[in-house]
Amino acid sequence: MAEIMIDLRLTINVPDRGIKINNLLYQLKEFMPEVFFGILRAIFSAVEEDAIAKLKKQSPGRYVRNGRQSGKRQIRTAYGLFQYKLARLYDKRTKKTLTPLCDAIGLPRYCRHMKEAAEGGIGLVCHLSYRRSAKEIDRILGTGMSKSTLHRQVQEFSRDMCNWPELKGIPYRFLMVDGTKVRLQQQGKKGQSKKVEMRWAMASLEEKGKFELVGIWLDKSWKEIRKELEKRLNYSNLEVLFCDGGPGIEDNLLADGMRVQRCILHGKRDFPYILYADNLKKAQQKPFKDKLKSIPVMNLTQRDLELLRPEDLPEVKRLAEKTKQGFKELIDALPAEKYPTARTYIENLSRDVTTFFDFWFANKVWIRLDTNAIESGFSQVKNRIWAVGKRWSETGLMNWLKVVVKKIFFPDTWNKLWDEYLDIDTNLTINLMEVRYQWL
């Protein structure tokens, strides 16, 4: 392994009143780009000379020095703009001029903004608009990056590094899905911004385990999502599907052997809209809403369940029986000929919202009652979507979402992801050999 030795000498002017800590730290921060550029220029020169020597040795007489390029090659780095005049070689055989350094270090020929300088902007755009992120990162680092350049780098990073991995090796047992509306720049039928469904899927290994994001889709049907999940997960291992009971979810995502656990919170929240669909105004809805509220299961929380132990079996049976009876009374109060929508809704809800009782009777472990894990994820992302951009294309939003997932939901892997993206070779090291000082 070859080594490059660089001698670096600095002079520091000390004021008569001495050195103050904040002034010292500030001046060092301001000076660091000079150190960075000085070392980078020395390394470029050393590698360039070595590359030229190797070419001449491989083909004696073929290459002739041809000075340096008239213009300086500009490279935007994390410390600002670096400029360097590339040495040229004339190839007698091909009659072309070469710049050996470009090939030696993999320097892109028509790109000023290096990937290494993009990390700050890409991380920032997960929280701020492209325009603000570009301005802020330029103010701090002097990268000179425009919002369009930042947008392009986000798209490239997303396509290269943020695709969903195959997760078949992870024995997920529980699947949770939900959807929410987002706005795109395309116009809908009425000339307004087009709204599409953003749908998420999360999965968990254990009853009390954390739900992990396993997929995000835009304007995709649940049937299409099922096909993708079957490729990504060991779908036959799933036991329970957590959802809000939305149209198409159970029909497309429920596999043989799976049970449904409807979200209790959605069950209570959606009931007034269902009653309204049967022409019941707010005042007329109250008796039915009160009946639903009186059912024990509709008032339980996850914390309430965790207080119940296997020795509390009689109490759990009482709750389950009272819940069953409460739903029966509510269904009887909703005759099909008068309230067809509400009756069907409660019949389905009564069947699917009590799966957690059956699971506990069989395993003596409580599963979740709600889809709060996805709701929490929505709250972290949906506001950011509106804050970052208001004229999203479907592709642009999807690529941005994949980056946000890595940044916000898997922060521990962010640095490793960038090491892979930059193809970091740990054999390349820079070591500080010695620092000495002398008063002049």
Image (spheres, rainbow, N blue to C red):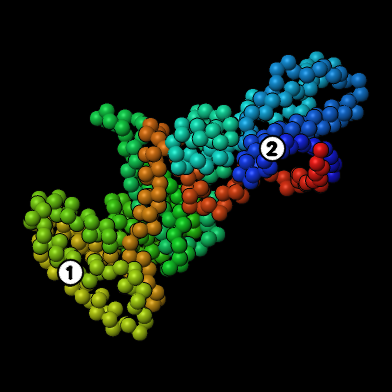
Which of the 4 quarters of the picture holds residue 305? bottom left
Where disc 2 sits, the SS reads loop
Give the residue number, with chain letter if any, for mark 1.
294
**In the picture, which quadrant includes the C terminus?**
top right
Q: Is residue 239 visible?
A: yes
**Which residue shows up at 51% across the image and 35% down it?**
136
Residues 149 and 345: in front is 149
Secondary structure of the residue carrying numbered label 1: helix
Decide: is 10 above or below 177. Answer: above
Q: Quadrant of residue 292?
A: bottom left
Q: Is residue 5 left or right of residue 292?
A: right
- Residue at mark 2: 15
Residue 180 placement, left or right of 129: left
Say left or right for 426 vs 396: right
Percent from the top left, x then y, of residue 193? 31, 32
Residue 261 screen position, x and y as percent: 32, 63
Residue 420 appears in the picture as rendered: no
Residue 233 or residue 47, whichever sits in front = 47
Circle 2 Cα neighbour tier, 10 Å, few/some/many (<14 / 14–19 / ≥20) = few
